[in-house]
Amino acid sequence: MNILDCPIEFDKGDFFSLVSLSAGAAIARQLAMGETVIGNSGWNVDIKNGTIAFGNRKFDSGILGTESEIEGTWLWGWANKESGLPERAAAPARRALKLLKAVPEFSNPSFMLDDLHNGHNIAMVCCGISDSNVCYYRCPYDGGALFVQISGLPGEIFAPLAPERLARKYFEVIQSFYCDHRLLAAGMLWLNGHEFKESAARIEGGGIAFDFEEVGGLNRVTNVSMTLTP
């Protein structure tokens, strides 16, 4: 399952909507990867061979793009001609371009960074549109950071969350992350393998019901409750 197949009405050309749909599952999986795989280990990226290692654990990886702290810009891996990257290295970035070419943030080779437009949000959407189990990692260097997409991670990172835990994660995300709460709920349920029923004011599925109100053009959650049927 990926967010582009999520059965909820949204603007597939709007970056903010894509981030809102992707963020919940992505953040939960990033935290699980940190606990399960990374811990206190250092990292090492081998661009030529397409791998990233955390301590003595090695996984397949591909380049998404880079953040420049000096210029304050994002540069897609497929547009980075000066670094002489192997063609295979930027496969995740090229896939994102193919799927989201109507989205300016994905079709423009480079753009300025801000609170919404940053490597973390770009990477979360790239994970959200993948049909495979993937996470991402920010690899900082002097003057910026490289973002890579990681595959071959332990399956437990992507295990569906029980309703109570999903609800807790949902609240954790909305307390610290600006997004559309309705799209966030839909994306979390969908990427956890749950079908859902929806109306303008409610989404129900996976043993949880989310109620919303519209405030300033965005949907804000008013209540989250457990239901008898998953």
Image (spheres, rainbow, N blue to C red):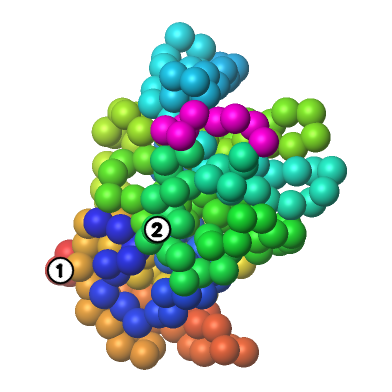
User: Which of the two marks, 1 or 2, is nearer to us in this view?
Assistant: 2
Three-letter code for the amino acid on which mark 2 is drawn? Lys
Quadrant occupied by the C terminus: bottom left
Residue 27 located within the stretch drawn in magenta: no
Q: Residue at x 67, y 51 (%)?
A: 74
Q: Which residues are magenta?
A: 82-89
Residue 224 visible at all: no
Question: 89 or 12, which lies in front?
Answer: 89
Percent from the top left, x then y, of residue 90?
48, 39
Question: 217 or 223, which lies in front?
Answer: 217
Three-letter code for the amino acid on which mark 1 is drawn? Thr
Percent from the top left, x then y, of residue 61?
43, 30
On the picture, is 3 further left or further right than 51? left
Label of residue 162 in the image: none
Residue furthest to the left in view is 229
Residue furthest to the right in view is 70
Question: 197 or 10, which lies in front?
Answer: 10
Label of residue 229 in the image: 1
For label 1, the SS is loop
Q: Residue at x 45, y 9 (%)?
A: 56
Dot 1 alpha-carbon crowd within 10 angstroms: few under 14, some 14 to 19, many 20 or more: few
Residue 187 visible at all: yes
For label 2, the SS is helix
Quadrant occupied by the N terminus: bottom left
Q: Earlier in the sequence, mark 1 or mark 2?
A: 2
Q: CA distance from mark 1 to mark 2?
A: 38 Å
Residue furthest to the top in view is 56
The quarter of the picture where residue 211 lies is bottom left
Magenta span dominant secondary structure: loop
Q: Which residue is mark 2?
A: 98
Q: Residue at x 32, y 29 (%)?
A: 152
